[in-house]
Amino acid sequence: MSDPNVNVLPVSRSRMNLRTLSSLGMLTAVAYVVMLLSKLLPQVSGFLQLDLKDTVICIGGFIFGPVASAVIALVVALVEMFSVSDTGPIGLIMNVLATCAFCCTAAFVYKKLHTKKGAVAGLFLGVAVLTVVMLLWNYLITPLYMGVARDEVKDMLVPIILPFNLVKGGLNTALILVLYKPVVNALRRAKLVPESQGVFQKTGKVSTGFALFSLALLATFVVLALVLMGIL
């Protein structure tokens, strides 16, 4: 008589892998759509785009880990380069560097400290890493992209590129804090995320104070973004 449990584990793993791939594919598609919508926003200084796809990619990283963030970032950047981007490989490099600096850092910290505090700490560290990385790489690559002298780009670092990346990272951070729980709950209901996947804390509850903090943070960075784009 055969053991009825022999094939249970392989089948379970197969279903889980299929669910994971389905979730990653969906998040990649949503991130691409958000990227397209972000292009409708005015650019800052004629070449800096306030892209909100990092919100989706970072949520994916919180659910599936930092490697998932890197994979989604690369796929979205590649599709963007071949579909709607006019910046070519340079734009691809800058997109992947910026997204991975923010999302992979935040997802790594959250993986190690799987709590609400860990999520907030990871996101703020991600903003810091994003800002430092993009200051460096804009200094190195922007002269090639824009065809200007490096000294001219150097003069842009503090007054333009620094606040742009702080606002971009802060806006994505606020959106993640507001949207993460409802997104994970929706994926759970669709059976695309296992029940063991925590939402900031084991109880899955978000306090009123934390919700108000997240909304206040979002409102603050929305205003800052509008100011940066010259709308306010």
Image (cartoon, rainbow, N blue to C red):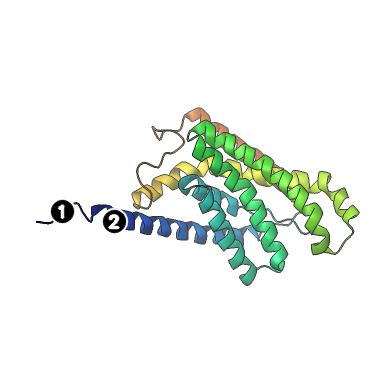
Label whose residue precedes the other's in the sequence (2 or 1): 1
At label 2, the amino acid type is Pro
Q: Which residue has dot 2 on it?
A: 10
- Disc sitting over residue 225 in the figure: none
The residue furthest left is 1
The residue under label 1 is: 4
Q: Name the residue furthest bottom.
A: 82
Q: Is residue 45 visible?
A: no
Left or right of residue 177: residue 18: left
Q: Residue at (32%, 54%) from the top-left corner?
A: 13
The x and y percentages for residue 131 are 71, 44
Q: Position of residue 141 (x, y in %)?
A: 78, 58
Quadrant into which the N terminus falls:
bottom left
Residue farthest toward the front in the current orientation of the protein = 1
User: Residue 138's x, y, as percent?
Assistant: 78, 53
Drawn side of residue 173 relative to residue 140, left or right: left
**Looking at the picture, which amino acid does disc 1 mark?**
Pro
Q: Secondary structure at mark 1?
A: loop
- Asked whether 78 or 218 is in front, the reply is 78
Q: Residue at x 36, y 41 (%)?
A: 196
Q: Nearer the viewer, residue 75 or 175?
A: 75
